[in-house]
């Protein structure tokens, strides 16, 4: 939960920051609360006894009916950025999905989160869906 605020980075500037903060905390709380179900897992990265990363993975059906491994949250502490923690956590999520017979791992990120999009692209992720919005004053 201490790193949950990092999940707010890259959210579209027109979104209410306070609402985003509450939503992010709820996402993490909900994902961690679902761990008693066999179709979800969380993997934690530690360094020197300190948590430096977290990935929550579950299953999600694509509109085609295909079921994918789905990364709900992936977060790495600022102190551990660039040390391979995120890559290791994604690999753990992929291994979990592979063991369950899944063919793809998917993750949603904001269009404005350029750093995350670059990270995922470097790991071989392809951008699949795009959500667009506009104000209707």
Image (tube, rainbow, N blue to C red):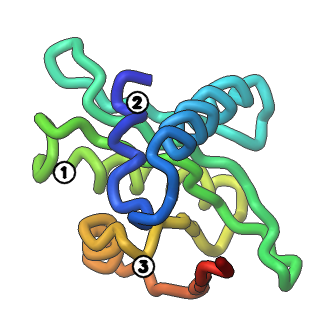
- Give the camera-side residue of 127 and 137: 137
The answer to the question of whether label 1 and label 3 lie on touching residues, with beta carbons closer than 8 A, is no
Q: Residue at x 16, y 39 (%)?
A: 78
Q: Residue at x 49, y 39 (%)?
A: 18
Q: Residue at x 32, y 35 (%)?
A: 53
Q: Is residue 63 left or right of residue 68?
A: right
Crowd tier of the residue under label 2, counting other residues whose Cα lies within 10 Å: few below 14, some 14–19, many 20 or above:
some
The earlier-in-sequence mark between 1 and 3 is 1
Q: In the rendered view, would you say 1 is above or below 87?
A: above
Q: Which residue is mark 2?
A: 44
Q: Which mark is residue 96?
A: none
Crowd tier of the residue under label 3, counting other residues whose Cα lies within 10 Å: few below 14, some 14–19, many 20 or above:
some
**Alpha-carbon distance for marks 1 and 3?**
16 Å
Q: Quadrant of the C terminus?
A: bottom right
Residue 23: horizontal and vertical position, in percent? 60, 40
Residue 113: horizontal and vertical position, in percent? 34, 67
Number of numbered discs: 3
Crowd tier of the residue under label 1, counting other residues whose Cα lies within 10 Å: few below 14, some 14–19, many 20 or above:
few
Q: Which element is circle 3 on? A: loop
Q: Which element is circle 2 on? A: strand
- Give the camera-side residue of 96 and 74: 74
Q: Which residue is mark 1?
A: 84
Q: In the rendered view, would you say 63 is above or below 39?
A: below
Q: Which mark is residue 125?
A: 3
Q: In the rendered view, would you say 43 is above or below 47?
A: below
Q: Which element is circle 1 on? A: loop
Q: Quadrant of the N terminus?
A: top left
Q: Is residue 14 left or right of residue 37?
A: left
């Amino acid at each position: 939960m201490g790193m949950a605020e990092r999940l707010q980075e890259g959210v579209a500037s027109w979104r209410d920051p306070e609402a985003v903060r509450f939503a992010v905390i709820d996402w993490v709380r909900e994902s961690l609360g679902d761990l008693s179900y066999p179709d979800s897992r969380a993997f934690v990265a530690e360094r020197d006894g300190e948590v430096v990363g977290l990935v929550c993975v579950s299953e999600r059906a694509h509109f085609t009916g295909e079921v994918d491994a789905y990364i709900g949250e992936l977060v790495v502490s600022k102190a551990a950025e660039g040390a391979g923690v995120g890559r290791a956590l994604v690999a753990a999520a992929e291994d979990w999905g592979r063991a369950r017979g899944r063919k793809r791992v998917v993750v949603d990120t904001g269009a404005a989160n350029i750093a995350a999009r670059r990270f995922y692209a470097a790991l071989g992720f392809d951008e699949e869906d795009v959500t667009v919005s506009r104000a209707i004053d």
